[in-house]
Amino acid sequence: MTGNNSRRAIFLDRDGVINELRPDPTTGLAEGPISVKDVSLTNDAIDAIKRLRFEGYFLVGVTNQPAAAKGTIGLAEQDAIHGLVTTLLKSNDASLDDWRICPHHPDGVVAELTMDCDCRKPRPGMLIDAAREHNLDLGESWIIGDSDSDIEAGIAAGTRTVLIGEQNTHKRQHPERASMQVDTLTEAVDKILASSN
Ligand SMILES: [Mg+2]
Ligand SMILES: [Zn+2]
């Protein structure tokens, strides 16, 4: 159900969209940071968030963070990394309206974080939950992400989808599934704003 007061939203993946990816120390693959010292915002995150906010979009971060579940880092470090991302956004006047974080993994080693949850992308739980709480019109909304799981979560929730980036090729097997594919976050915002005017 979409009421008259329902709002358009942009769902933003975190790692590779808002903050930079880093080479995983074990695999060398581009992954989200597992230390606060490796946290830095992407070049265009601040401007992109400000532009979307100016156009009236409700902004929700939606991020899978399974490193603590898998025992790679502790939950305190994982929380500190996320805290630094949000602090950097806030200090640049670019806070999101809300965040949804999935800390689970189906094959984790930490019991309380190990489960087959509904929130871990590609499942749409985080988007649907945020839409209910904030009265968001999913059909008029978009997700911006750099992995297949972001795109599939958006499709399952009924949003349009934009795939950005290029670094994490191991998580991008089906780019054709996205409504649009562009190189950068700035370009994603350009296309979204052009399509809504
Ligand atoms: Mg990502
Ligand atoms: Zn979850």
Image: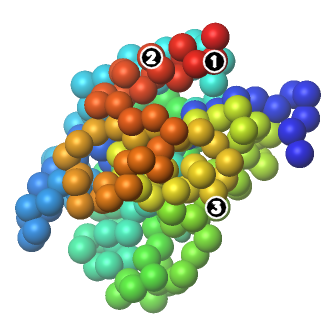
Is 152 on the left or on the right of 64, as rendered?
right
Looking at the rendered image, the disc whose residue lies closer to the viewer, 3 or 1, is 1
Give the residue at x 24% y 74%. Answer: 72
Element under disc 3 = helix
**Mark whose residue sits in front, 3 or 2:** 2
Task: Check disc 1 and give the amino acid type.
Answer: Ser
Task: Say left or right for 5 vs 82.
Answer: right
Q: Residue 89: where, in percent of width, then height? A: 40, 30
In 3D space, how far apart are the residues under numbered discs 2 and 1 (Cα atoms)?
10 Å
Q: Label 3, on which residue?
A: 125
Which numbered disc flags the more N-terminal residue, 3 or 2?
3
Q: Residues within 10 Å of mark 1 (few under 14, many from 20)?
A: few
Reply above or below: 173 against 4: below
Q: Are marks 3 and 2 in contact (CB under 8 Å)?
A: no
Q: Give the structural element (helix, strand or loop) at label 2.
A: helix
Identify the residue at horizontal 47%, vertical 73% (top origin): 104
> Looking at the image, which residue is at 35% across and 37% down?
164
Q: How many marks?
A: 3
Ranked by sequence position, the earlier of labels 3 and 1 is 3
Q: Residue at x 75, y 29 (%)?
A: 7
Disc 2: which residue: 190
Which residue, as the protein is rendered here, is positioned at the far front? 176
Q: Position of residue 118 (x, y in %)?
A: 61, 70
Q: Which mark is residue 184?
A: none
Q: Within 8 Å: ligand 1 and the Cβ of disc 2?
A: no
| Cα distance in 3D space between marks 3 and 1 | 25 Å
Tell me if 135 is positioned left or right of 144 in this view. right
Q: Are marks 3 and 1 in contact (CB under 8 Å)?
A: no
Which residue bears the numbered disc 1? 196
Rendered location of residue 60, percent (x, y): 57, 40
The picture quadrant where one finds residue 32 is: bottom left
